[in-house]
Amino acid sequence: MRQILSLNAFNLADAARLDSHAAAQVRRRAGLFGAASVLFYDQPLQIVRGEGCWLYDADNVAYLDAYNNVPSVGHCHPQVVQAVARQMGLLNTHSRYLCEGVETYAENLLSTLPPALSNITFTCTGSESNDLALRLAQNATGGTGIIVTDCAYHGNTSSVAQVSPSALKQGQLSSHVRTVPAPSALTVGADRLSAHFAGLVEDAILDLQNRGIKFAALLVDSIFSSDGIFADPPGFLSDAVAVAQRAGGLFIADEVQPGFGRTGATLWGFQRHAVEPDIVTMGKPMGNGYPIGAVVTRPQILTAFCETIGYFNTFGGTAVAAAAGQAVLDVIAGDGLMDNATQVGAHLRHGLAALALQYPLIREVRGAGLYVGVDLAGQGRPAPVLARTVINFMRERRVLIGAAGRDGDVLKIRPPLCFSIQQADRLIEALDDSLRAALSNGADPAE
């Protein structure tokens, strides 16, 4: 399995082939950040500003951003920028004071979720959200066992890294964690997927129990983004959730990636599967670049936790964070971004499916809304080298995408929700050119 940070990462050993200025910048960064420094692309980018779906480098060259989900409603959206600046000019402090803006935002956000999920706790990041969710689930159930998919990524705190297989470079997951394969209709068949995935979850629960580990929670990102993006058929997750809840565990819906209208038809990814989580976690996209996260759950789960431990986060739920979050909700509704994600996403997938007829190495196009995966294979085997080559050719054509999947062979397309039909067409054209260039330059799809 490919480690998530290694997908399309720049190799510092290649710095010598960059021009002198870029090489100096790369070495400066490496000296400052050490082994934790990660850059994208064979030719790293120096981005200096963004607007809508565009990023601009130091030479004012524009790149179509079809990768970054942090600026969910578009880079530097003026409505979000103004809301943050206005509130920053008034007050920004910890959340132990009454603040009408924070409470109003909480009410508005909760109104989009099932009524039983009526308590919210703010954090700063998705990692913090998932960390707290694990603690809530383990406290509520008295168990420690967690089930995730085998290429999942849920964050980078100590406990969340333990349930993020794709973050591991070596070693094994902790003994209380079990993994199940990603729910792929390509390998199982759409008609069998729900029962098959539920069976895998049931087997994992039994394995935990047989080893004396009480089951606490099934934790999934409902678009299965790091696993390679698995969205269809809608509803396939419901049987697995039922199995988990019947076994006394909780269902944690990690909505950091699929939430806030990303999948188009619904605001939350879990809603596509007609399931009700016990805990919902949120992060990156909710502040459009301002750090904010949240955990939503039922009052009895949060009350039991606070009677034992309690929770406080200095910067979670500040007035500025709430202003950013409220502005994002307002823009999603006011600019019709869910409908846009549905319509442009369908257009994009249709165009990519047409490319698949020209390039048999495209094994499958999948996704929902504006979260799309293009699975590449050669002679029936994953093609990670080809995927990396294509991503870098796309960068040369000034379109930015990423990679995902167990083998790093899935092109990950995840633009801001304001992505247009014309921009989707530009991406499709760039991918066509990049595939043709990669193959003509001797890229081996079977490698």
Image: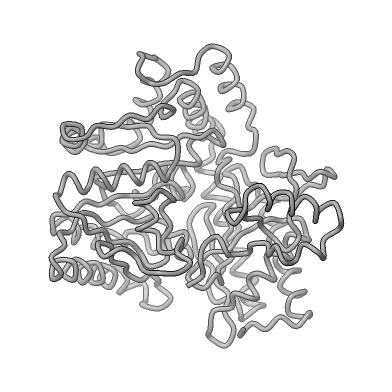
Q: Residue at x 30, y 44 (%)?
A: 133
Tell me if I can see residue 429 in this picture: no
The C terminus appears in which quarter of the rendering? bottom right
When the figure is inspected, residue 294 is found, relative to residue 80, above or below; the finding is below
Picture colour scheme:
one colour
Which quarter of the picture shows residue 129?
Answer: top left
* Residue in the image at 64% along x and 82% along y: 445
* The one of 353 and 402 positioned closer to us in this rendering: 402
Determine which quarter of the picture holds residue 417.
top right
- In the current view of this chain or complex, which residue is farthest to the top? 90
The residue closer to the viewer here, 69 or 169, is 169
- Residue 186 percent location from the top left of the image: 43, 75
Residue extending furthest bottom? 379
Disc tally is: 0
Q: Is residue 301 visible?
A: yes
Query: Would residue 325 appear left or right of 398 to someone viewing this image?
Result: left
In the rendered view, would you say 123 is above or below 224?
above
Q: Locate residue 352 relative to residue 273 in the image: left or right.
A: right
Q: Where is residue 271 in the image (x, y as percent from the top left)?
A: 34, 48
339 or 291: which is nearer to us? 291
Instruction: Answer above or below: position of 348 versus 91.
Output: below
Whole-percent x, y for residue 204 in the image: 23, 69
Which residue is drawn at the image coordinates 36% and 69% (left, top)? 172
Q: Where is residue 421 in the image (x, y as percent from the top left)?
A: 66, 50
Residue at 59% x, 48% y: name it.
Answer: 68
Question: Horizontal placement of 165 versus 367: left or right?
Answer: left
Instruction: Give the image quarter of residue 337.
Output: top right
